[in-house]
Image (cartoon, helix red, strand yellow):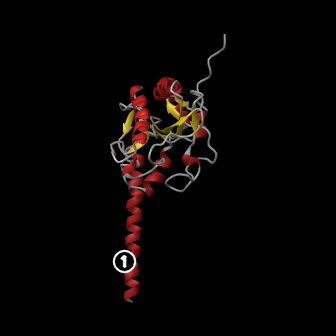
Amino acid sequence: MYNIVIRLHFLCFVYTFFCLHVSAQDTVKSTLPIIKDPEQFRMVVSNDSSQQLIRLDKLAPNIRLDLRYADKNNFTGKRLYPRGLKITFLRKAPAEALREVAIELEKQGFGLKIFDAYRPYSATVEMWDLIRDERYVANPVRGSGHNRGLSVDLTLYYMRSGKELAMGTGFDNFTEAAHHDNPNLPEKVLINRGILKSVMEKHGFQALDTEWWHYSWPNNRKYDVLDLSFEEVNRFQPSPPRQH
């Protein structure tokens, strides 16, 4: 009889925790403006072209994609994006700034390798369920720069060899070795991080202290969180200019 009572108490605890979790998710969904309808996004873009999401793979010839969440080579060990995904996006202003970054780096013999940029909101919720630490994963209550098409995760590579520059850690490293202010790193690593940081900040991006690869464009409350698939976003790409 005692064991039965203990089990009942345990089941009640589990049920209560589940209800609280669901309630919290419902609260997030009801208070945070999230664009999920492609038609709504089309209307937003038609009224304000700066809301457009621009494909990064077509910005400059020295931009490469290595979208880690399209396979299992990431901190979750899970594939969060469609398998073999070859496209990602930023809003118009940061996309244009990133093009200028790529042009400047090309003159130095460097290219940009993109690990992640636009991230559907549902993927952020899944990440938060795994690592509830706001130093490394955005809290879904507020959404993230990635969800708004304002953040990009990237590194540098040598155009001649295709090899990545040494940055001290890999992508999605949740240790102090990934922090910008960590002095206990080889001088070459600090120099390489400095090259990336200086050119990104020169063109308007802001660094994240805990992740050397993460840069964001200022939001100023203009951009809403999006939960659109990559395929849906790709339908709204601007038409190429006409040839005269």
The residue shown at (38%, 32%) is 219
Name, please, the residue furthest toward the front: 187
Considering the image in quadrants, where does the C terminus appear?
Answer: top right
User: Can see residue 144?
Assistant: no
Quadrant, the N terminus:
bottom left
Farthest residue, direction bottom: 1
Q: Is residue 162 above or below residue 122?
A: above
Q: Residue furthest right?
A: 244
Q: Amino acid at mark 1?
A: His
List the single residue furthest toward the top: 244
Badge 1: how crowded within 10 Å, few (<14), some, or many (20+)? few
Percent x, y of residue 33: 42, 40
Residue at label 1?
A: 9
Residue 108, image x, y percentages: 50, 27
Residue at position x 43%, y 29% from top? 199
* 14 relative to 56 in the view: left or right: left
Q: Nearer the viewer, residue 35 or 208?
A: 208
Residue 159, horizontal then vertical, whole percent: 58, 32
Residue 155: give x, y in percent of width and height: 49, 38
Q: Is residue 136 left or right of residue 105?
A: left
Q: Is residue 159 visible to the viewer in this orientation of the structure?
A: yes
Between 203 and 85, the one nearer to me in the picture? 203
Determine the image quadrant of residue 225. top left
Q: In the structure shown, which secondary structural element does the residue marked by tag 1 occupy?
A: helix
Q: Using the image as rendered, state which of residue 32 and residue 164 is in the foreground.
A: 164
* Relative height, residue 41 to residue 12 (above, below): above
